[in-house]
Amino acid sequence: MLELRNLCFQVSDDANERIDGVLSTETGRPMGEKLPLANPHSKEIIRDINLTFKDNAFVAITGPNGGGKSTLAKLIMGIERPTSGQIIYNGTDITQMDITERAKLGISFAFQQPVRFKGIKVRDLIQLAAGGMKGGRPKVKFPDICDYLSKVGLCARDYVNRDVDASLSGGELKRIEIATIIARGTPLSVFDEPEAGIDLWSFNNLIQVFEEMRRESDSSLIIISHQERILNIADEIVVLAEGTVQARGQRGDILPELLKGTEGCKFYQQPSAALQ
Amino acid sequence: MDEIQKNLLEQVAGLHEMPAGAYNIRANGKSVERSTTAHIDIVTKEEKQGIDIIIKPGTKKESVHIPVVLSQSGLTEMVYNDFYIGDDCDVTIVAGCGIHNSGDSDSRHDGLHSFYIGKNSHVKYVEKHYGSGDGGGGRIMNPETKVEVGENSFMEMETVQIKGVDSTKRLTSAKLAEGARIVVTEKLMTHGSQFAETSFHVDLDGADSSANIISRSVARDDSRQVFYSKINGNNRCKGHSECDGIIMDRAHISAIPEITAEHLDAELIHEAAIGKIAGDQITKLMTLGLTEAEAEAQIVNGFLK
């Protein structure tokens, strides 16, 4: 179980910092010294969020752009640290834990914009995801790598030996990112807009991937998404806007309301139709 | 040969025992082992240190190993090796130098390798440099490579220096005839207070000749690297150089590419990029359960693989 207690996240405004930097030469302060920012200058991205994610649940987080969804996902993984509040995972306070510790506790994170590496092959990345080496041998065998890649619609033979670099398209990269999460097989997986950059054909596969992960026991999913078809397979939906939880509930209660609000916007309602 | 020399040999030439094919092993300034084949002859130079390697026209799928190991502290040598490769050959040449210095005087190996490649041949040339030993004396290597690539021939050159060389200046120059190609890949890592300078000078003289120079380097600690590459397009040709450097700690990297077109149909490109390891790369690997240090090592190893 994952609990977010009174979670807040503020960022300082870059423009204000720069102004302070210029002023600092006049005031004789050493350059580069950051002045404590007054609260009005900093921006609240997450405002006092309290949320509980039960085990074996599939929760979709949706809401307008800039509402704090990605930040919330990063706070869970430890990529960002909260300004205040607590994150409790299975009874352990993980607020101060770094990314590695959280990963080892069983949390996975799929990036919205996957990272490229020069010289790291698809095979290497999946092996690292699946737990690296044991006794000088990779823990994961080729048929498994093949399986993970085929789940995201990639033919392993074409991809295992390719570098995870600029030679891959955005969509390919995204599918490989999702394959690394499948390979990890952790109790909690957080996906930040998994549908972004994925073509229609793979999108159908993606839905299947989530449904399959959902069926497997001991697997909780938190998916940040704008897609109705993803929201449609979630157990619960959280609507996040302006850094706060606007609504939360069972899919059947939340989704109809959401769709009402976006009537007339085909892109929001029917991504597949719009893409055709 | 003793164990230290055997270890050096394994590092620079991947050799556990005597290789198949032609070879010449030089240890502490002397040729200690040599083998020739029906198509490849190795002759000691008389007027200066070094050997001539003569590969007969039409030699296919054969290899030559000419590793050099130095384990005597304070030894300094300058060696001239000339390679004469006939027409229609397909050969692999593995050179390399390992220095083990446990003394306080500098050990230094300077080598000039000259390649004269005939027509329609394919030469793969692999050069590895490695240093070990904990003495205060420096481990210094200054390899120079001069290549003349004949008509429609292809030279592939791989140079690797990952560990233990305190100071190196590596100069490579190539002249290409009509239809000739050269591809050079360099992998370099420096640490401590090491210094490495790389310089490529390529003249694309013949029509439809091409050159591709790819350098990947990592500079750690207080080490310093300078990369020069100069490609002259003197005919209808294609030239590309790429220098990609990862800077860490307090290191210093300079990349100074230069391209000159002397012909309307010369197509020349240079790319140079230097930067630290991208933060999101480390973050991604940490989300897979690696520590920050493990993530960094993984990224560097992959980059230089």
Image (cartoon, coloured by chain):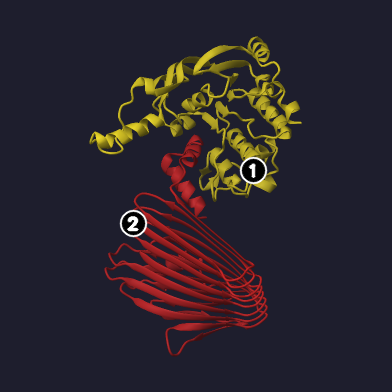
Chain colours: A yellow, B red
User: Mark on residue B231?
Assistant: none
Please give the residue where the numbered disc 2 appears in the rendered image: B192
Above or below for B177 versus A83: below
Count of all numbered marks drawn on residues in the image: 2
Image mark 2: chain: B
Viewer can see residue A217: yes
Viewer can see residue B29: no
Question: Depth check: B277 or B77 in front?
Answer: B277
Percent of width and height locating residue A203: 70, 31
Q: Residue at x 48, y 51 (%)?
A: B301
Q: Amino acid at mark 1?
A: Ser
Judged from this view, the residue extending furthest toward the left is: A28
Q: Are marks 1 and 2 in contact (CB under 8 Å)?
A: no
| Image quadrant in which you'd find residue B263 | bottom right
Percent of width and height locating residue B165: 38, 64
Left or right side of B121 for A275:
right
| Image quadrant in which you'd find residue A30 | top left
Question: Depth check: A268 or B50 in front?
Answer: A268
Q: Residue at x 25, y 35 (%)?
A: A26
Judged from this view, the residue extending furthest toward the top is: A253
Left or right side of B186 for B140:
left
Q: Quadrant of the N terminus of chain B?
A: bottom left
Q: Amino acid at mark 2?
A: Gly
Q: Residue at x 71, y 31 (%)?
A: A205
Marks 1/2: CA–CA distance: 38 Å
Q: In terms of secondary structure, where does tag 2 sit?
A: loop
| Image quadrant in which you'd find residue A99 | top left
Q: Could you classify mark 1 by the number of other residues whose Cα lies within 10 Å: few (under 14), some (14-19), or many (20 or more)?
A: few
Percent of width and height locating residue A188: 55, 25
Please give the residue where the numbered disc 1 appears in the rendered image: A169
Question: Depth check: A62 or A88 in front?
Answer: A62
